[in-house]
Amino acid sequence: MKIIIADDSRVMRQIVLRTLRQAGFGHHDYVEATDGADAFDKVAAERPDLVLSDWNMPNKTGIELLRDLRGSGNAVPFGFVTSEGSEEMREAAAAAGALFLIAKPFTPEHFESVLVGMLG
């Protein structure tokens, strides 16, 4: 499976990747995107099986990315990995079509419980 990790922080992209590997998902192909606009382009080019996106990014936020993907007819499975997890954000994410929202700080066990059904 191919997974896009979208976050404007290179360090956070690496933390997400390391946590995914610790959760047992190291055998997948990962593509990094530096913001929502970059992720939108990479979804078109790479045709991923899953997008993991931060919420707050320059050029295009995560929620804008999700809405733009859905607006263009792209139904790629999508989840947020972000520093905030308010009920309002969770509701907005679900309404836009996100499958989940993982709030930082997170653990490999948290990733495993959320992703095991999708990534096996």
Image (cartoon, helix red, strand yellow):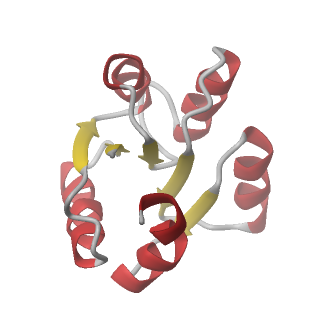
Residue 11 lies, in percent from the top left, at 19, 57
The answer to whether 113 is drawn above or below residue 13 in the figure is below
Depth check: give the residue in front, 30 or 84: 30
Number of numbered labels in the structure image: 0
Name the side, left or right, on which 2 lies relative to 27: right
Q: Can the viewer see residue 105? A: no
Name the side, left or right, on which 75 lies relative to 112: right
At 31% from the left and 25% from the top, the residue drawn is 46
Give the image quarter of residue 65. Answer: top right
Q: Can the viewer see residue 11? A: yes
The answer to whether 103 is drawn above or below residue 88 in the figure is below
Q: Quadrant of the C terminus?
A: bottom left
Residue 62 lies, in percent from the top left, at 53, 39
Name the side, left or right, on which 30 lies relative to 111: left
Residue positioned most to the front: 120
Depth check: give the residue in front, 112 or 71: 112
At 20% from the left and 68% from the top, the residue drawn is 18
At 24% from the left and 40% from the top, the residue drawn is 32
Residue 71 lies, in percent from the top left, at 69, 18
Residue 98 lies, in percent from the top left, at 65, 48
At 66% from the left and 18% from the top, the residue drawn is 73
